[in-house]
């Protein structure tokens, strides 16, 4: 649109239109304003006969009575001897002028907006770049709005307030990576007041005269967030949130839009609280302790007992091979053929498992035999703050999860091996379905058992292994009744030590039973949200112009302009009354003219030349 409204030819056409309106308004205004001083008298019966409304009264009402009657009903009354002229509703003749003034006002406001954009008097098409957990006090606008917002065409300007991204959420279309809706939870502060609000595509935030909208977003691995699972024991609903330290994040509970979760950190010993932000009331406080050295298998099983649909990665193999004993192992710690074992748990019970490979060719051999969930190993990374000689426990893996029926993308999640990850948004029908007792044999005996198949799928080198031993091992690891204890017992000592796990313990500050169970699920990637911002100084002026147009339309539509002429013919002893109406809006009520004639007739008195008794032939005659 900037390529139209900012061009010289558009401004030239706008100027021609304004000139045309000014000339039309001048003509109409001169006519309307001169009507007030108009002195137009009629003194001929033939002229009265041409009027839309006319009447003939036999008799001559007194001069004072005629003047008084007209002044009672009309705003402008003129007299010239025995002739009268009156007006009413003169404002309606100014309706067109008022409308034209409103149009010119709106055009002037639009022109001001164009130049305000060019000279920086307002804020247009500006962008706020805001990573989750970060605060900014600047925005970026284009120097030349006719060019793309690229480096060199952007300038940073200060915001009159600070804005911080507390959280970002996106809802995707089923079986798609396209977002159907997304929103940002932000905190705005100007030093005196602060406000927490959610900005979505349909609900912008207006603060300090600025309109802030949700434009777009992108995932950024450099933005690290802590992931927590919160289970409401009253409803059985589980919510998975990612937070930054000390940032309140709304818990999406049905019917409760003001319950927030806040954590003091995203690693180490973490204190948390759940509170009602509007009522400033703390609902629950506690601690979530992260202690890799003290984690036990009982901790995992205790956490699983409260979950709805969970994923545990008990093994990460940087360079997956089948050992001579038929067991899976890693040749070394070089990530040449990464693989993970993903075990699913539903309602605290085993629910099948999958082997996931980073190389797509290897994964295609493995297939996706799980009847409820498809899982893909997309990437791996080293956790921040770990030592250079750290173990496999210090890594995280990116897993993409998809629900089979109904088809839906559940999301991509960074998961740390040895932790319990609660999968969000699983369909209730899947949660109520029976657990997967065992995996199809074909998926394990024919696809997974042979190292030869893996070697063909993976261009990297692969060690040989005995088919029989591999088959029994994989069948055992994929058994639906497998517990974490059984899985860990099948792994060799080196691998078990590498992914020994992460302790997740919750402790309450009070002895009262806690409504919410909080568990820590490691770290995850955050998002960068892009907010749009606009402050248009021309908007109030445009509203004023629209109001002027509305007033002019109502004036022209609801007010009727009327003109009345009265001539008292002394020679014939008759009084002539006539009325003309300018119909522009509502239909005129003709009873007003009849009422005027009746009032004048009621003032009739004998003239000095006539007898004291009115003639029996005196009558009103409507022409």
Image (spheres, rainbow, N blue to C red):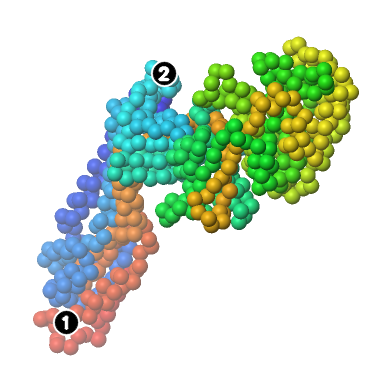
Q: Is residue 389 left or right of residue 328?
A: left
Residue 383: name its quadrant: top right
On the image, the x and y values in percent for residue 602 come to 22, 80
On the image, the x and y values in percent for residue 92 come to 28, 55
Q: Is residue 157 left or right of residue 521?
A: left
Residue 64 seen in the current view: yes
Label 1: how many residues lie within 10 Å, few (<14), some (14-19) or many (20+)?
some
On the image, the x and y values in percent for residue 271 come to 48, 42
In this figure, which residue is indicated by the disc labeled 2? Answer: 151
Badge 2 element? loop
Residue 485: name its quadrant: top right
Residue 423 seen in the current view: no
Mark 1 touching mark 2, by CB under 8 A?
no
**Which of 360 and 441 lies nearest the eye of the viewer?**
441
**Which of 73 and 161 lies nearest the eye of the viewer?**
161
Q: Counting residues from the N terminus, which is met first, the one under dot 1 or under dot 2?
A: 2
**Which of 29 and 552 lies nearest the eye of the viewer?**
552
Badge 1 element? loop
**Which of 12 and 427 lies nearest the eye of the viewer?**
427
Q: Of discs 1 and 2, which sits in the foreground?
A: 2
Q: Is residue 612 above or below residue 168?
A: below
The span from disc 1 to disc 2 (Cα, nearest Å) is 93 Å
Q: Is residue 386 above or below residue 345?
A: above
Task: Tell me the residue at 50%/37% (across/down).
Answer: 269
Q: Quadrant of the C terminus?
A: bottom left
Residue 605: give its label. Answer: 1
Residue 114: name its quadrant: top left
Q: Quadrant of the N terminus?
A: top left
Q: Is residue 203 above or below residue 354?
A: below
Task: Tell me the residue at 38%/32% (across/down).
Answer: 136
Label 2: how many residues lie within 10 Å, few (<14), some (14-19) or many (20+)?
few
């Amino acid at each position: 649109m900037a390529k139209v409204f900012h061009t010289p030819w558009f401004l030239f056409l706008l100027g021609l239109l304004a000139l045309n309106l000014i000339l039309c308004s001048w003509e109409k205004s001169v006519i309307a304003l001169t009507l007030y001083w108009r002195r137009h008298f009629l003194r001929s019966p033939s002229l009265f006969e041409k009027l839309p409304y006319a009447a003939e009264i036999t008799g001559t009402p007194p001069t004072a009575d005629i003047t008084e009657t007209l002044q009672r009903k009309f705003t402008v009354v003129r007299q010239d001897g025995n002739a009268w002229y009156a007006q009413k509703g003169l404002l309606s003749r100014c309706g067109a002028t008022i409308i034209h003034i409103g149009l010119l006002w709106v055009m002037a406001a639009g022109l001001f907006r164009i130049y305000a954009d060019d000279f920086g008097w307002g804020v247009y098409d500006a962008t706020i770049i805001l990573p989750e957990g970060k605060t900014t006090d600047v925005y970026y606008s284009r120097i030349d709005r006719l060019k793309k917002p690229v480096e060199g065409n952007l300038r940073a300007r200060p915001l009159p307030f600070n804005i911080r991204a507390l959280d970002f959420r996106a809802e995707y279309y089923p079986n798609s990576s396209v977002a159907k809706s997304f929103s940002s939870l932000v905190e705005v502060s100007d030093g005196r007041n602060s406000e927490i609000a959610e900005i979505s595509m349909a609900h912008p935030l207006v603060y300090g005269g600025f309109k802030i909208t949700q434009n777009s977003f992108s995932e950024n691995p450099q933005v690290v967030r802590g992931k927590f699972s919160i289970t409401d024991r009253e409803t059985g609903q589980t919510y998975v949130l990612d937070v930054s330290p000390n940032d309140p994040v709304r818990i999406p509970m049905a019917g409760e839009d003001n319950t927030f979760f806040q954590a003091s950190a995203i690693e180490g010993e973490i204190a948390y609280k759940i509170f009602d932000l509007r009522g400033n009331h703390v609902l629950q406080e506690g601690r979530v302790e992260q202690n890799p050295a003290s984690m036990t298998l009982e901790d995992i099983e205790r956490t699983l007992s409260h979950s709805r649909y969970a994923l545990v990665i008990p093994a990460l193999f940087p360079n997956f091979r089948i050992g001579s004993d038929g067991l899976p192992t890693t040749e070394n710690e070089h990530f040449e053929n990464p693989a993970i074992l993903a075990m699913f748990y539903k309602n605290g019970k085993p629910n099948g498992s999958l082997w996931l490979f980073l190389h797509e060719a290897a994964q295609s051999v493995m297939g996706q035999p799980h009847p409820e969930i498809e899982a893909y190993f997309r990437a791996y990374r080293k956790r921040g703050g770990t030592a250079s000689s750290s173990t496999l426990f210090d890594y995280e893996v990116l897993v993409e999860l998809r629900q089979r029926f109904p088809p839906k993308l559940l999301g991509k999640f960074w998961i740390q091996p040895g932790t319990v990850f609660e999968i969000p948004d699983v369909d209730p029908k899947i949660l109520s379905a029976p657990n997967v007792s065992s995996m199809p044999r074909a998926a394990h005996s024919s696809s997974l058992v042979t190292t030869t198949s893996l070697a063909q799928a993976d261009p990297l080198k692969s060690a040989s292994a005995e088919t029989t031993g591999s088959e029994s091992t994989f069948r055992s690891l994929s058994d639906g009744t497998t517990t974490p204890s059984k899985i860990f017992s099948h792994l060799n000592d080196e691998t078990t030590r590498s992914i020994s796990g992460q302790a997740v313990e919750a402790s309450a500050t009070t002895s009262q039973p806690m409504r919410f169970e909080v568990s820590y699920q490691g770290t995850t990637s955050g998002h960068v949200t892009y907010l749009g911002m606009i402050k248009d100084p021309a908007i109030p002026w445009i509203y004023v112009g629209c109001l002027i147009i509305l007033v002019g339309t109502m004036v022209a539509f609801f007010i009727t302009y009327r003109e009345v002429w009265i001539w008292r013919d002394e020679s014939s002893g008759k009084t002539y009354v006539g009325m003309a109406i300018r119909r522009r809006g509502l239909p005129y009520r003709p009873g007003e003219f009849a009422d005027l004639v009746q009032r004048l007739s009621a003032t009739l008195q004998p003239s000095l030349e006539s007898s004291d008794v009115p003639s029996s032939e005196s009558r009103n005659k409507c022409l």
